[in-house]
Image (tube, grey):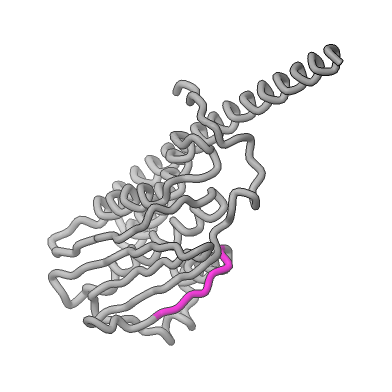
Amino acid sequence: VASDISERKKQEEEIRASLKEKEVMLAEIHHRVKNNLAVISGLLQLQTYSANNEEVEKALSDSQMRVQSIALVHEMLYESESLAYIKYDKYINDLLQAISSMHMNSKEIKLTSEVEPISLSINQAIPCSLLINELIVNAFKHAFNDQEEGEIKVKLRQHEDEITMVISDTGSGFDIEKFNDSDSLGATLIKTLSDQLGSKFEILENSKNKGSVFKIKFIRESHSDQVHPSSFSRNNPKS
């Protein structure tokens, strides 16, 4: 009996050591991905500075913001204890700051959020982040052409397993038919990312004031839907 207990303890220690090793490896992967994406973002920024065509400059700037939104997910996963889930309310605030800094101009466009404490897996965090980025950037580009001030607002809430994300603006409104028929990169990404989340996607008119409302609903992926090394705390490997 003593021999069996000793063998069982040895096996448990080996399993714990293996899990810890996998945690460190996964953290290092997130760290390296984040750093590689930062390099790509930097290269896109350099190309933006040297672009002599406004359309090319905008395309490069948009691509840089998409890369940054993905890099931010990996950065937060690297800093997270679970390595598989991030605190998405904190992430959104960081993402909105990054988007605001990329779209600073003479107009007074406020970017605000109303977000409940929610955690999302990497499988959902990345497409959700890209979707938020596309919708906000689209609003910055097109919603306020005839206005000097306005607001873009992001709301995120959870009821049981359902996540509801609402992105609204006080701009000039949105041509729904034109969007549905559009084959632009932005419109294609919005449709593709919505499908990837398995979400219900609606475009509505802002009832309180003029503008547009984008509503996305999807089912949050639970911890049991994922296989990941462990959710207990660990120390990050050094840079």
The residue segment tinted magenta is 197-203
Identified at 45% across, 78% down, the residue is 202
Q: Does the magenta stretch include residue 177?
A: no
Q: Where is residue 72 in the image (x, y as percent from the top left)?
A: 41, 44
Q: In this view, does 198 lie above or below 4?
A: below
Task: Give the quadrant of residue 158.
Answer: bottom left
> So how many labels did they put on this image?
0
Q: Which residue lies furthest to the front in this view?
A: 1
Depth check, front residue: 181 or 210: 210
Query: Does the rendering let one see residue 43?
Result: yes
With 209 as the anchor, is 198 left or right in this view? right
Identified at 48% across, 70% down, the residue is 217
In the rendered view of the protein, which quadrant contains the N terminus? top right
With 204 as the anchor, is 82 left or right in this view? right
Task: Give the quadrant of residue 9.
Answer: top right
Q: Is residue 177 above or below residue 138?
A: below
